[in-house]
Image (cartoon, rainbow, N blue to C red):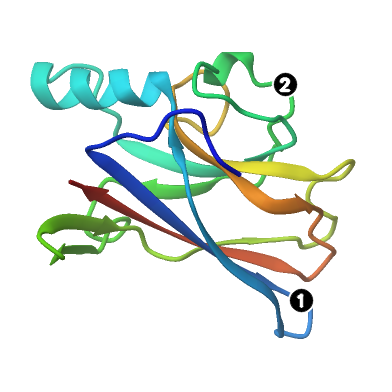
Amino acid sequence: MEHEKKHKWYKSIWEFVHIDKNGNIKERWETENALADEGESSVLDSYFRATNTPSEFYLRLTKDTLVETDTLSTLTGAVSGNGQLLKRTVTGFPTLSFVGGDYRLSTRQVTITASGTTIPKTGQAQYVFISTTSDNSGKLIAFVALSQGRKLAIGESLKITVRITLQ
């Protein structure tokens, strides 16, 4: 999905691997995400003003269709119970490298697994997003549309790696 606004200084590629209950790859894809307005504000506030610096991030699914001006508090379709923690450490973001003349940071591979029930329980997830909290009280940092609406069946998983480049 194309987003309205690409950022000249920020590029983030999200890699997805959908695994079935037998461990077989159902689909693999990469796509570029959008940086939410709250994410832009958070980066500037945290880095240059040393305020409101999040201690951790979460990768989460939502049934909402997201746009850059959305905030975490306006989401109504965030799927509960599937947020995966990304600590602000070398464990959560293990790779900092110099690639093609720019620095790139990669997250660890995060896995969302449907165990005991489908994810989501009703409907289909449309987007994945990074937030500063596991509930809707924090900031919406970035988001990306899934290649199609998804419901993870029991035993299926979605593996996600995010690569962020400053250009």
Q: Quadrant of residue 103?
A: bottom left
Write the residue at 14% across / 27% down.
Answer: 47
Write the residue at 71% across / 85% down.
Answer: 24
Q: Is residue 43 above or below residue 143?
A: above
* Towards the viewer: 65 or 72: 65
Write the residue at 43% across / 29% down.
Answer: 5
Residue 73 rendering spot, x and y as whole percentages: 57, 14
Q: Amino acid at mark 1?
A: Asp
Q: Is residue 124 visible?
A: yes
* Towards the viewer: 39 or 101: 101
* Towards the viewer: 132 or 164: 164
Q: Quadrant of residue 36?
A: top left
Q: Residues within 10 Å of mark 1 (few under 14, many from 20)?
A: some
Task: Tell me the tag on residue 20.
Answer: 1
Q: Residues within 10 Å of mark 2 (few under 14, many from 20)?
A: few
Q: Quadrant of residue 100?
A: bottom left
Q: Which residue is mark 2?
A: 76
In this image, 137 relative to 11: left or right?
Answer: right
Q: Secondary structure at mark 2?
A: loop
Q: Secondary structure at mark 1?
A: loop
Residue 54 rendering spot, x and y as whole percentages: 30, 29
- What's the distance in space between the residues labelled 2 and 1, CA to CA? 28 Å
First along the sequence among labels 2 and 1? 1
